[in-house]
Image (spheres, rainbow, N blue to C red):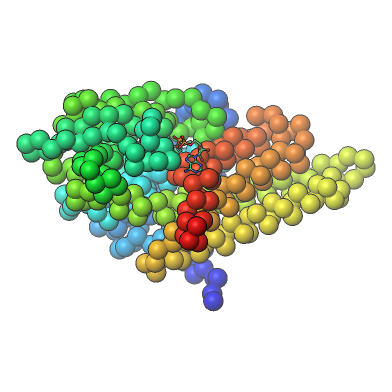
Amino acid sequence: MDFSWTQEQLNYKSRIIDFAKEHLNESIVERDAKLQFSREAWQKCADFGIQGLASPLVYGGYKKEIDILTATLAMEGLGYGCKDNGLPFSLNAQMWTVQLPIAEFGTEAQKEKYLKKFTSGEWIGCHALTEKNAGSDVFAMETTAEKVDGGYLINGCKRLITLGPVADAALIFCVTNPKLGKWGISGFIIDKGSKGFTQGHNQAKMGLRTVPIGNLTFTDCFVPDENRLGAEGAGWSITTSSLEYDRGGILGSQLGAMERQLEDTIAFIKSRKQFGKSIGEFQSVSNRIANMKLRLETSRLLLYKVAWLKSIGQSAMMEAALLKLQLSESFIESSLDAIRSHGGTGYLTENEIERDLRDAVGGVIYAGTSDIQKNIIANLLGL
Ligand SMILES: Cc1cc2nc3c(=O)[nH]c(=O)nc-3n(C[C@H](O)[C@H](O)[C@H](O)COP(=O)(O)OP(=O)(O)OC[C@H]3O[C@@H](n4cnc5c(N)ncnc54)[C@H](O)[C@@H]3O)c2cc1C
């Protein structure tokens, strides 16, 4: 068993950390308060090559084939260096649930058109499954794509879509054959401005506030045959294939954030003095640090295992569910421990401690809630 990274991978991670610290941490408190997305930061990431980690070289990507191990480590570095958790979250959403499915299931023309634009930062993409009556029970979706001459007519509404309000193209999933259940779902790529396609406003939310989120509505929206992703009925295969990568990437960035949070908290409790000594000398405070470290390292092992399994082409259903559950719940617990350890300082927004807790809560909801992860785990154990 070998847990080491190559020097090349480690160098790349440190370059990303330096880049993120230098270019991505400006005015986050203000942007968080005003729900402001930074297209400029998005473009800087593309110019650095972040989005390229999820595209093959020929479409502007980082390597000949997508290298999930390097990408996972890189996203960890991004989460560590970038204090705006929203930016890595939204980048991961595009990279693993839009770019990757197009790279895996797309036609040559789709890859040529969309992957190059997403990789270069010219375009932003979103991934839309969730609806009013289809959240955890995602295949209860009601948005339909009815076959017509030369394409499909789409009707329905998707909600809670990350980057939905600013996306230049949306990968959406619709019912093409209601009799076939999950095998009757198909994916389509729809460009901004298509007739009958409306992008909703940016909805205010608790955390990840620098990322726009909103509804996508389709009213007799015509999409040509060439914009269907994969075969008719391949929707389920497309979404399940990307989910394991999505969990790896997004959670990689959260792991980086947890490491940064732990280091900041240790530095604070060493320097903060009460009762004539550093508060870190009080065992009730240092015990919290031990718990934060334990959560970080157990999450790390699960993350690297998922990345390794995907790198050798294996399924990681169980491991990805364990990872999602462990890491997202840990981030909440550790964010709360960080606030407690900082005392009143941690409670003030301007000190950038409490934001992690608000950002972490989304992690136990999106990409399958914690309850659903437990269901997957129990199910895979034969229950
Ligand atoms: C920040 C954020 C970003 C998101 N981005 C996207 C996106 O880009 N694209 C997209 O398509 N969606 C996105 N979503 C939506 C997300 O995937 C859904 O919110 C999630 O799947 C849960 O669905 P729901 O909100 O309808 O909750 P529900 O499914 O109604 O769940 C409500 C509660 O019931 C529990 N529950 C439901 N069913 C079961 C069950 N079988 N067993 C046990 N408990 C159950 C849930 O765990 C939860 O506690 C995003 C959500 C958030 C918060």
User: Residue 185 appears in which quarter of the rendering?
Assistant: top left
The residue at the point 26 percent across, 49 percent down is 183
Q: Vertical placement of 58 versus 354: above or below? A: below
Q: Nearer the viewer, residue 249 or 118?
A: 249
Q: Residue furthest front?
A: 383
On the picture, is 256 further left or further right than 286? left
User: Residue 68 appears in which quarter of the rendering?
Assistant: bottom left
Q: Position of residue 55 (x, y in %)?
A: 32, 54
The residue at the point 35 percent across, 60 percent down is 66
Q: Nearer the viewer, residue 374 or 179?
A: 179
Q: Position of residue 371 (x, y in %)?
A: 53, 45
Q: Residue furthest right?
A: 276
| Number of numbered discs | 0
Q: Nearer the viewer, residue 111 or 186?
A: 186
Q: Nearer the viewer, residue 208 or 237?
A: 237
Q: Residue furthest bottom?
A: 1
The residue at the point 84 percent across, 45 percent down is 279
Q: Vertical placement of 310 versus 274: above or below? A: below
Q: Vertical placement of 103 versus 366: above or below? A: below
The residue at the point 86 percent across, 41 percent down is 273
Residue 56 appearing in the image = yes
On the picture, is 319 further left or further right than 331? left
On the picture, is 151 further left or further right than 257? left
Residue 256 appearing in the image = no
On the picture, is 214 further left or further right than 375? left
Question: Which quarter of the rendering shows the N terminus?
Answer: bottom right
Q: Position of residue 370 (x, y in %)?
A: 53, 45
Q: Position of residue 336 (x, y in %)?
A: 68, 40
